[in-house]
């Protein structure tokens, strides 16, 4: 690789870094700036002149952020559990079992992914209402409990396991559940971590669906509840930034716990031979 190519690559990397990480760093810096500090100065500084936690205290006092965060956590746990259990079993069935209609089901899953999510909102809402789950956290979590993309990811991970291992297990008398639990799952732990992270982030960051389903203020999720900050403190972006950082912490912690398996699943596709 020539020196010119290296320079171009590094410039592109720096540009992507500024576009993706820059807004986050700016929000983090703003959340620690005092009321007397001008955040719109022509010579902006990422380091606060007088660092303070007052913005976090104000956000926590004026808006029940912890209650909203708990609601989001309940929704995220339901979504992650549903995706891990449901998509793992569906992916295994579509990749390792033979049954009529398997290709038809796979085609239906692919077709559903081509449809914009907004196109199914009305039908989705009517279904949840007919089940009596409007204004409940279960009603918020249920539509995202099994993601179509996650099913395809798990199917791909199971397909990467050599069939000879299954055939040897069948000769030894292992039934379908034994092969799923003792051969399949241990080989796709990385992809399970990927699915878990995707499901958690999708449930935690979702705004439109909780806004449609929830009406009681005490049941709002964090992304919807933070809109109160925009309304009450629209003139104080420091408090809004503090609320945004509070919402970011659980996602960072969850990703940190699974990052080792996450990168292993992305890099190796959960193939263990």
Image (spheres, rainbow, N blue to C red):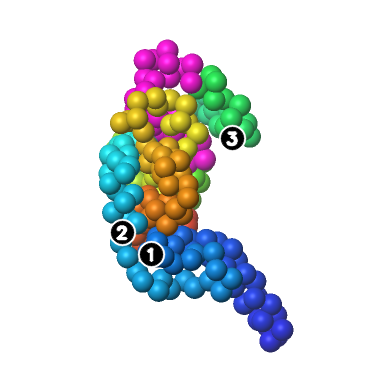
**Which secondary structure lies at badge 1?**
loop
Q: Position of residue 222 (x, y in %)?
A: 37, 41
Disc marking residue 113? 3
Q: Position of residue 46 (x, y in %)?
A: 47, 71
| Residue 115 lies in the magenta-colored region | no
Q: Position of residue 3 (x, y in %)?
A: 69, 87
- Confirm or deny contact between disc 3 and disc 1 (CB under 8 A): no
Q: Position of residue 106 (x, y in %)?
A: 56, 32
In three-dimensional space, the C-alpha distance between marks 3 and 2, rounded to whole angstroms, equals: 44 Å
Residue position for label 2: 54
Q: Residues within 10 Å of mark 2 (few under 14, many from 20)?
A: some
Which sits in the foreground, 221 or 186? 221
Quarter of the C terminus within the rendering: bottom left
Position of 224 relative to 48 (above/below): above
Residue position for label 1: 34
Left or right, residue 68 beside residue 101: left
- Which residue corresponds to the image point at 39% horizontal and 25% vertical from the top-left? 215
> Which of pointers 3 and 1 lies earlier in the amino acid sequence?
1
The reply to whether residue 187 is in sight is no
Q: Residues within 10 Å of mark 3 (few under 14, many from 20)?
A: few
- Which residue corresponds to the image point at 39% horizontal and 15% vertical from the top-left? 131
In three-dimensional space, the C-alpha distance between marks 1 and 2, rounded to whole angstroms, equals: 8 Å
Which sits in the foreground, 183 or 3? 3
């Amino acid at each position: 690789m020539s020196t010119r190519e290296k320079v171009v690559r590094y410039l592109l990397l720096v540009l992507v870094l500024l576009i993706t990480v820059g807004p986050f760093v700016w929000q983090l810096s703003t959340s620690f700036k005092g009321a007397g500090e001008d955040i719109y100065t022509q010579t902006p500084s990422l380091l606060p002149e007088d660092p303070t936690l007052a913005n976090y205290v104000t956000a926590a006092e004026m808006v029940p952020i912890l209650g909203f965060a708990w609601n989001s956590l309940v929704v995220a746990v339901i979504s992650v559990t549903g995706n891990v259990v449901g998509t793992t079993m569906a992916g295994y069935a579509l990749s390792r079992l033979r049954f009529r209609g398997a290709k038809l089901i796979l085609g239906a899953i692919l077709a559903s992914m081509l449809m914009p999510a907004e196109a199914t909102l009305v039908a989705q809402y009517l279904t949840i209402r007919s089940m009596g789950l409007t204004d409940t956290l279960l009603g918020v979590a249920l539509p995202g409990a099994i993601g179509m993309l996650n099913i395809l990811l798990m199917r791909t991970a199971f397909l990467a396991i050599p069939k000879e291992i299954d055939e040897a297990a069948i000769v030894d008398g292992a039934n379908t559940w034994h092969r799923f639990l003792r051969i399949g799952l241990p080989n796709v732990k990385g992809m399970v971590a990927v699915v878990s992270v995707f499901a958690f982030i999708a449930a935690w960051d979702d705004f439109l669906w909780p806004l449609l389903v929830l009406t009681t203020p005490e049941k709002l999720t964090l992304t919807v509840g933070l809109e109160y900050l925009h309304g009450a403190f629209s003139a104080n972006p420091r408090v809004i930034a503090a609320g945004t950082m509070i919402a970011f912490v659980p996602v960072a912690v969850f990703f940190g716990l699974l990052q080792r398996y996450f990168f292993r699943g992305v890099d190796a596709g959960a193939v263990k031979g």
